[in-house]
Amino acid sequence: MSKSIEFYFDFGSPYSYIAHKQIQKVEKKNTFKIKYMPICLGGLHNSAGVTAPAFIPIKAKFMIRDTKLVSEKKNITFKFNSYFPIKTLNLMRGTLISQEDKFEKLYIKKIFDAIWKDGLNMNDQIIIDKVIKNMDINSKTFFLRAADIKIKNKLKKLTDDALQKGIFGAPTFLVGNKIFWGQDRLSYAVNEAEK
């Protein structure tokens, strides 16, 4: 019997975007469920004592080259965002609203694409509002809901729970209690889910 795969992600992670594009293909071919698990990657890194590659100059240069290489090899349309790093906290909270309102797949795709395919400045609220409105969502109401203390606490709890499970970065795939870290580990997670 197939298990589900939990996909821990943050929109600010280019590798999460690459993983998401691969997940979209996997979902079409398989019967197991992908559970989208939004986290605050910055908060997770702080709690885990991890410095993100974006803040280590030599790693940041490598990451830019590597994400372009990986996306080319996997035939994924990708543009390293010139506004990076993107402040994604409200966007991640928005994922929880999209889950409540049953449009999470559309929301996740549109936000990832806005950042890593279209290269939009998703630090600019005017641009964010346009992206949200293009989903036929009232942006003002949407972000008022995302600012609710219950939503804030839920994202914090998801992030804290991820750390307690041993997760320290994104993207991460969890099948049962087995952790697979990195976009290049999706196939391992799929194999585990199919056991």
Image: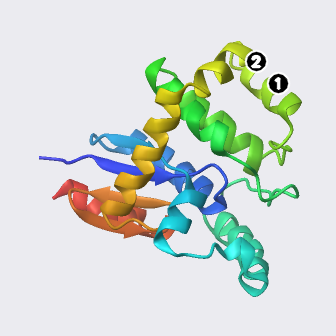
Amino acid at the residue labelled 2: Lys
Residue 32, x across and y down, in percent: 27, 42
Quadrant in the rendering for residue 128: top right
Residue 11, x across and y down, in percent: 63, 49
Q: Which residue is drawn at 67% across and 76% down?
A: 53
Tell me, what colour scheme is on the image?
A: rainbow
Of residues 46 and 104, the one nearer the viewer is 46
* Outermost residue toward the left in this view: 1
Apparent side of residue 172 relative to residue 132 in the rendered image (left or right): left
Q: Specify the label residue 133 is tagged with.
A: 2
Against 84, residue 39 (above or below) is above
Q: Do the residues labelled 2 and 1 touch (CB within 8 Å)?
A: yes
Q: Specify the label residue 55 is tagged with.
A: none
> How far apart are the two marked residues, 2 and 1, measured between alpha carbons?
5 Å
Residue 14, x across and y down, in percent: 66, 60
Q: Specify the label residue 130 is tagged with.
A: 1
Quadrant in the rendering for residue 71: bottom right
Of residues 28 and 130, the one nearer the viewer is 130
Q: Residue at x 47, y 49 (%)?
A: 23
Apparent side of residue 22 relative to residue 91 in the rendered image (left or right): left
Look at the numbered disc 2 and give the secondary structure of its residue: helix
Apparent side of residue 148 relative to residue 58 in the rendered image (left or right): left
Q: Which residue is drawn at 35% across and 49% down?
A: 6
Against 39, residue 47 (above or below) is below
Q: Residue at x 80, y 25 (%)?
A: 129
